[in-house]
Image (cartoon, rainbow, N blue to C red):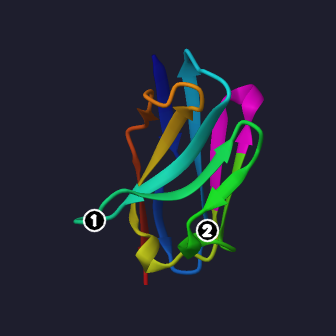
């Protein structure tokens, strides 16, 4: 089993910055993809950014140039640096881990709230 623990959410004014962290523990399969998804009230959960254990990254168009995902594989931790935040970035942000060779396994964190005031 894999546990994901997120931290770093909060309330920030538009134009501000936040950094989210997600630490994975347990039986972590490699190679894997770790990433961040978000879900606003009444909307579906969408991908924000992902990073493979080989450091290949992918971003949603809406956050390109503002958000940066990074990994510390030695610490099994993924980060999301969020700059120039906008009110539309307000959502619950979820950490995700997917083993690349076992696609039926899919692990989620409990979520952390990010609120951007205008």
The quadrant in which residue 85 appears is bottom right
The residue lying at 66 percent from left, 47 percent from top is: 51
Q: Which mark is residue 43?
A: 1
View extreme (bottom): residue: 118
Going from N to C along the chain, the mark reached first, 2 or 1, is: 2
Magenta stretch: includes residue 66 = no
The residue lying at 22 percent from left, 65 percent from top is: 42
Magenta stretch: includes residue 74 = yes
Q: CA distance from mark 2 to mark 1?
A: 23 Å
For the C terminus, the quadrant is: bottom left
Q: Position of residue 68 (x, y in %)?
A: 69, 60
Badge 2 element: loop
The residue lying at 74 percent from left, 49 percent from top is: 56
For the N terminus, the quadrant is: top left
Badge 1 element: loop
Q: Which residues are magenta?
A: 71-81
- Against 87, residue 12 (above or below) is above
**Magenta segment, principal secondary structure?**
strand
Q: Position of residue 114 (x, y in %)?
A: 44, 61
Q: Position of residue 57 (x, y in %)?
A: 70, 53
Q: Which mark is residue 11?
A: none
Query: Residue 112 vs residue 44: left or right?
Result: right
Q: Which class describes the residues within 10 Å of circle 1: few (<14), some (14-19), or many (20+)?
A: few
- Against 117, residue 114 (above or below) is above
Query: Residue 93 vs residue 22: left or right?
Result: left
Q: Are marks 2 and 1 in contact (CB under 8 Å)?
A: no
View extreme (left): residue: 42
Query: Circle 2 sits on which residue?
Result: 17
The residue lying at 26 percent from left, 64 percent from top is: 41
- Against 115, residue 55 (above or below) is above
The quadrant in which residue 105 appears is top left
């Amino acid at each position: 089993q894999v546990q994901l623990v997120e931290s770093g959410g909060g309330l920030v004014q538009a134009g501000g910055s936040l950094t989210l962290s997600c630490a994975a523990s347990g039986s972590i399969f490699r190679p894997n993809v770790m990433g961040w998804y978000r879900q606003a009230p009444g909307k579906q959960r969408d991908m924000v950014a992902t990073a493979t254990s080989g450091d290949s990254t992918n971003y949603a168009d809406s956050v390109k140039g503002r958000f940066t995902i990074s990994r510390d594989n030695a610490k099994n931790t993924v980060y999301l640096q969020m700059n120039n935040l906008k009110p539309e970035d307000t959502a619950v942000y979820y950490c995700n881990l997917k083993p690349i060779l076992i696609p039926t396994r899919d692990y989620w964190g409990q979520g952390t709230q990010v609120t951007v005031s205008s």
